[in-house]
């Protein structure tokens, strides 16, 4: 685990409005994945040919391709979240998440660097959050929603 007690999620203004301020994953399927030979993955990436949470972490972040999982990407760096929030139209929101509340609300965290030898965006220090029911991340862990603009 990284040392920060906060995590951040940056989203565009339109995404924030579309999801009504909620942190909703792309799917509610279980957080596991099985790689197949034709996917072009490398065994030195840490991937295996069985269904596992480690494979889901690896697949979630590969090339920022947006593979649908029940995980929600976060970072311990406010500036990286701001970058994602403002990269499309210059205006967005950063959700500040209190890491000390994760366990209490049944949210698991997966620190990408603990599973992936070469993360797609190493400066993000990405942490994937997964709710116990694989659904939306409970809003009770969000302590602040901060409006941001690009610089």
Image (cartoon, grey):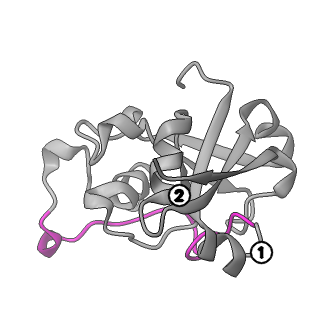
Which residue was labeled with disc 2? 85
Q: Does the magenta portion include 23? A: yes
How crowded is the residue under tag 1: few (<14 C-alpha within 10 Å), some, or many (20+)?
A: few
Stretch in magenta: 22-40
Instruction: Check the picture and name the quadrant holding the N terminus.
Output: top right
Q: Answer yes or no: do the residues labelled 2 and 1 have beta carbons within 8 Å? A: no
Q: Does the magenta portion include 141? A: no
Residue 134 lies, in percent from the top left, at 67, 66
Asked if residue 151 shows in the view, the reply is yes
Say which quarter of the image contains residue 76.
top right
Which residue was labeled with disc 1? 20
Above or below, comparing residue 28 to residue 128 in the picture: below
Above or below, comparing residue 64 to residue 54 in the picture: below
Residue 65 lies, in percent from the top left, at 31, 68
Query: Is 109 on the left-hand or right-hand side of 40?
Result: right
Residue 7 lies, in percent from the top left, at 63, 38
Query: Is 74 on the left-hand or right-hand side of 126?
Result: right
**Which residue lies most toward the bottom here?**
18
């Amino acid at each position: 685990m990284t040392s920060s007690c906060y995590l951040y999620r940056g989203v565009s203004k339109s995404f924030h409005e579309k999801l009504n301020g909620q942190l909703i994953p792309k799917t509610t399927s279980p957080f596991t994945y099985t790689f197949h030979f034709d996917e072009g993955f490398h065994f030195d990436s840490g991937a295996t040919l069985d269904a596992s949470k480690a494979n889901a972490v690896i697949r979630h972040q590969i090339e920022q391709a947006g593979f649908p999982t029940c995980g929600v990407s976060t970072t311990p760096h406010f500036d990286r979240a701001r970058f994602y929030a403002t990269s499309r139209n210059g205006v967005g929101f950063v959700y500040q998440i209190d890491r000390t509340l994760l366990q209490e609300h049944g949210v698991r965290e997966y620190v990408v660097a603990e599973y992936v030898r070469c993360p797609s965006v190493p400066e993000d220090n990405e942490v994937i959050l997964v709710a116990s029911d694989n659904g939306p991340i409970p809003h009770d862990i969000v302590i602040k929603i901060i409006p941001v603009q690009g610089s």
